[in-house]
Image (cartoon, rainbow, N blue to C red):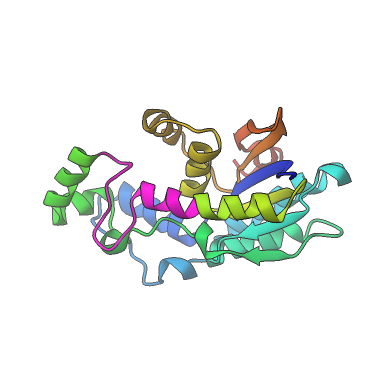
């Protein structure tokens, strides 16, 4: 049975939540000033421009190299990134939503900065230090291992449902990093080393099949954003 020929992962463009979180951290605040639930956070104006630049990058590919299927996180910022990107293609495939590609759920820590977690939940900060980033689960949230479990499920489905296909996934930074963990069979230590690189908004990561294995071609590529003057 044939498997995926090509797997691409794009992080959503900059969101208003990204902007608010950066502002809160820079100001030394405990919490991000935002009332939306995570699933409803929209793109910023820059994020919309980044999504268009991503689409133009895809449009530059030869027809036999472009995605044959697009699967997307149901979160608004990812859906709008996919929509704006695919509008740049003459004959784009439909966007299929799959909740297994949603962002990692932070539970009680949603909208808290690192300073806020330390100040308001010092016992949890200590528990995270003991368990390590990969296995620590915030109250009512998900550990990285939890996210990896749902990703193994959906990546297996993509492989079976798109034999010989080229699938683009539009999702979130944690999804990109943990897909590397799964596809490349990384250890916990190797994963944490990859995680030190910030996955840029609207960046593109690609694996292509070689010797019956998906192998990393490019990670966190932002050349299309640089060319558009968006970095």
Magenta residues, start to end: 132-151
Counting from the top left corner in percent of width and height, residue 196 is at 41, 33
Pick the residue in front: 129 or 38.
129
Pick the residue in front: 188 or 173.
188
Query: Quadrant of the rendered structure where residue 219 is?
Result: top right
Question: At x 23% / y 60%, what residue is drawn?
Answer: 139
Left or right, 112 with respect to 219, comes to left
Question: At x 56% / y 55%, what residue is drawn?
Answer: 154
Question: At x 70% / y 50%, what residue is drawn?
Answer: 167
Counting from the top left corner in percent of width and height, residue 87 is at 77, 61
Counting from the top left corner in percent of width and height, residue 228 is at 70, 43
The overriding secondary structure of the stretch rendered in magenta is: loop
The quarter of the image holding the C terminus is top right
* Magenta span contains residue 104: no
* Magenta span contains residue 141: yes
Query: Quadrant of the rendered structure where residue 207 is?
Result: top right
Q: Residue furthest left?
A: 123
Examine the rendered structure and indicate whether residue 49 appears above or below residue 97. above
Q: Residue furthest front?
A: 1
Pick the residue in front: 102 or 147.
147
Left or right, 63 with respect to 224, comes to right
Examine the rendered structure and indicate whether residue 130 appears above or below residue 86. above
Counting from the top left corner in percent of width and height, residue 80 is at 62, 64
Query: Can see residue 208?
Result: yes
């Amino acid at each position: 049975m044939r498997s995926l020929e090509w797997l691409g992962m794009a992080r959503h463009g900059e969101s208003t939540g990204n902007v608010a979180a950066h502002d809160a951290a820079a100001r030394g605040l405990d919490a991000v000033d935002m009332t939306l639930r995570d699933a409803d956070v929209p793109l910023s104006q820059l994020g919309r421009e980044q999504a268009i630049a991503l689409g133009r990058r895809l449009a530059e590919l030869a027809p036999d190299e472009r995605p044959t299927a697009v699967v997307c996180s149901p979160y608004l910022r990812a859906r709008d990134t996919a929509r704006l990107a695919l509008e740049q293609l003459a004959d784009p495939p439909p966007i299929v939503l799959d909740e297994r590609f949603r962002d990692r759920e932070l539970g009680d820590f949603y909208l808290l900065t690192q300073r806020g977690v330390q100040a308001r939940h010092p016992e949890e900060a200590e528990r995270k230090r003991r368990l390590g980033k990969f296995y620590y689960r915030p109250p009512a949230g998900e550990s990285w291992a939890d996210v990896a479990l749902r990703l193994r499920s959906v990546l297996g489905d993509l492989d079976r449902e798109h034999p010989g296909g080229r699938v683009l996934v539009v999702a979130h930074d944690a999804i990109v990093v943990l897909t590397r963990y799964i596809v490349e069979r990384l250890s916990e230590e190797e994963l944490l080393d990859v995680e030190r690189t910030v996955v840029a908004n609207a960046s593109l990561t690609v694996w292509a099949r070689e010797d019956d294995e998906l192998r990393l071609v490019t990670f966190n590529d932002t050349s299309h954003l640089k060319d558009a003057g968006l970095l």
